[in-house]
Image (tube, rainbow, N blue to C red):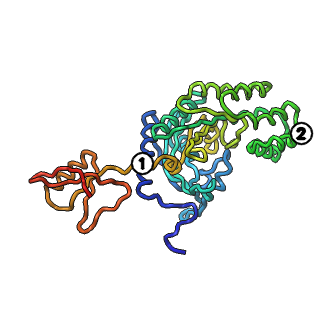
Amino acid sequence: MSAWVLPDHIADVLPSEARHIEELRRIWLDHARRCGYELVMPPLMEHLDSLLSDSDPSLNLQTFKLVDQMSGRTLGLRADTTVQVARIDAHLLNRQGVTRLCYCGPVLHTRADRPGATREPFQLGAEIYGHQGLEADLEILELALRSAHSTGLTDMVLDMGHARIVPALLAGLTLSEELIQSVHTALGRKDSASLANLTHDFPPHVSNALQMLPKLYGDAAILESGRKALSAWPQALAALDELQTLADQVKGCRLSFDLGDLNGYGYYSGVRFALYSANAGDALLRGGRYDAVGAVFGRDRPAVGFSLDLKEWARCLPRPIQHSAIRAPWSHEASLRLAIDALRGQGETVVCVLPGHENEADEFNCDRELVQMGTQWTVQPFQP
């Protein structure tokens, strides 16, 4: 095999795409900073037990593992940054009040999570710790949507669900873990026939409600349908009230609801959401409330946030136009160097043509050139 061939689902990011990703990173992080979120940079590698979360067992399968030659302990390359940020909140900051944190950096996956996906996402996220109320959920949603609009994403659909609906229906029943897992799988597949077989021995009202859940998806009218179908479970009704409260406040996108969606059911503890666009086949952003994320670090406090892959985000947006640039000759002449420095100081891109070579670039469009007029250097339209 050639030395330059990369592993499957691993790819270089070339100039124009890299610049696009960097510009998107700045948009997201600048929005987060203006809303009071502090930037953290966790390490790419740390002890394995601090990278894994009891609430998300899939992380273990997605984490690359290696042995530390210094200590002999097992290390992991992070597959998700959320757990690391929870560790920072719990032990390094250890604040008593609300903490807002954001982050951006690569993560590594042992396997691509879907066909065509990268195993090295460039993950960006924002999280609020310390507030149980829906105010934190709404703030996170607004940050995500406003930032998404600023990147140029259009035709957005925000899909919402709630992690406490299914547990409310199963509460009080004595069920094996295997049976619970099978019910979750059937709900995830929206398989009403399997649900009917699996819940045959359940109390009739529970069985009927579980079989209704796969059909409870659509626009805001689904919330009212859900209230009728789940009227016997106060906790499920409270979850619907939370969804309604957020739906009344969210602006700038279409809303959909899926009351039987169990995506990340072992991880989320309240409202969960996913952002879709017509230009992307899968969710571009996922988030919600995950109050148990810090439990592994001995500090189980409220948490809500979102994360996304900037590489995937960049792919669903139109390729940006080339940046306008100024072409300049190469010379040690002091007046030319001063002119170039002045233009760069004004924010212009100046590309110097090295002797014997024309500049080749995908990112820049040299539509002007620096020309000497008498003793002065002036910018003129460039005629190739």
- Toward the bottom, the furthest residue is 1
Q: Tell me where residue 234 appears, x and y as whole percent.
A: 75, 25
Q: Which residue is at 84% across, 41% downward?
A: 175
**Element at badge 1?**
loop
- Residue 4 to residue 384: above or below: below
Q: Position of residue 71 (x, y in %)?
A: 56, 62
Residue at mark 1: 320
Q: Quadrant of the N terminus?
A: bottom right
As rendered, which of 337 and 151 lies closer to the eye?
151
Residue that sits furthest to the front in the current view: 383
The image quadrant of residue 327 is bottom left
Quarter of the rendering occupied by the C terminus: bottom left
The reply to whether residue 96 is in sight is no
Image coordinates for residue 299, horizontal then vertical, percent? 61, 39
Q: Nearer the viewer, mark 2 or mark 1?
A: 1
Which label belongs to residue 200? 2
| Residues at marks 2 and 1 touching, judged by CB atoms closer than 8 Å | no
x, y (%) of residue 290?
Answer: 63, 38
Helix, strand or loop at mark 2: loop
- In the rendered view, would you say 70 is above or below 155? below
Task: Give the CA distance from mark 2 to mark 1.
Answer: 56 Å
Q: Residues within 10 Å of mark 2 (few under 14, many from 20)?
A: few
Residue at 29% in and 54% down = 366
Say whether disc 2 or disc 1 marks the residue closer to the N-terminus.
Answer: 2
311 left or right, relative to 292 = left
Q: Amino acid at mark 2?
A: His
